[in-house]
Amino acid sequence: MHPFREAVEADDHDAIHALLAEDVVFTSPVAFKPYAGRAITAAILRGVSRVFSDFHYVREINGPDGRDHALLFEAKVGDKAIHGCDFLHLNEKGEIDEFVVMVRPLSAATALAEAMGAQFERIAREATEEAERPA
């Protein structure tokens, strides 16, 4: 089992944070522009954990070189069932440097966009606070 999956299933946000490269690029299923950086990505993932209920991974597919992983999941956003996949790429240090999420169906993606939009002020504040903390 991939350490990211283990951390998500344990709701361990410190472990999730530690697995992200400083320069990770997060591509959201509901935003046009990718987000760059560990602070904003970690804050988005915390926001997602507040929005999703009944989240669980159903399958894990690993690339032959060990640097690419697809983690298929199911969850709910409000009363909408959502199916999705986290596509992870690891850098040479084993940190997640690319993180792409895709979800379906459209009705659930729309519900996710609305729920995350309601979270975004908090997400931005958390990311800014983290970025301003001394290392």
Image (cartoon, helix red, strand yellow):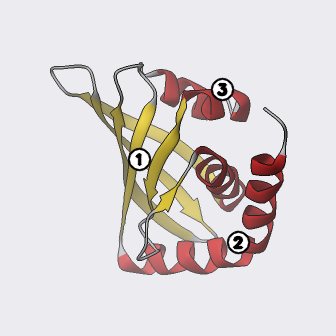
Label 2 and label 1: CA atoms lie apart by: 19 Å
In terms of depth relative to the viewer, which is nearer, 112 or 37? 37
Badge 2 local density, few (<14 within 10 Å), some, or many (20+)?
some
Look at mark 1 in the image and give the residue it sits on: 99
Identify which amino acid the numbered label 2 is placed on: Phe
Marks 2 and 1 close (CB-CB < 8 Å): no
- Tell me where residue 107 appears, x and y as whole percent: 43, 80
Q: Element type at marker 3?
A: helix
In terms of depth relative to the viewer, which is nearer, 74 or 51? 51
The correct choice, above or below, for 41 with respect to 80 in the image is above
- Tell me where residue 19 appears, x and y as whole percent: 55, 28
- Tell me where residue 4 appears, x and y as whole percent: 51, 29
Identify which amino acid the numbered label 3 is placed on: Ala
Look at mark 2 in the image and give the residue it sits on: 120
Q: Residue at x 43, y 72 (%)?
A: 33
Q: Is residue 123 left or right of residue 58?
A: right
> Which numbered disc, 2 or 3, marks the residue that appears first in the sequence?
3
| Quadrant of the snapshot with the N terminus | top left
Badge 1 local density, few (<14 within 10 Å), some, or many (20+)?
many
Identify which amino acid the numbered label 1 is placed on: Phe
The correct choice, above or below, for 59 with respect to 113 in the image is above
Q: Is residue 90 left or right of residue 24?
A: left
Look at mark 3 in the image and give the residue it sits on: 15
Q: Quadrant of residue 8?
A: top right
> Which numbered disc, 2 or 1, marks the residue that appears first in the sequence?
1
Q: Residue at x 72, y 77 (%)?
A: 118
The correct choice, above or below, for 79 with respect to 55 in the image is below
- Tell me where residue 5 appears, x and y as whole percent: 49, 30
Label 1 and label 3: CA atoms lie apart by: 16 Å
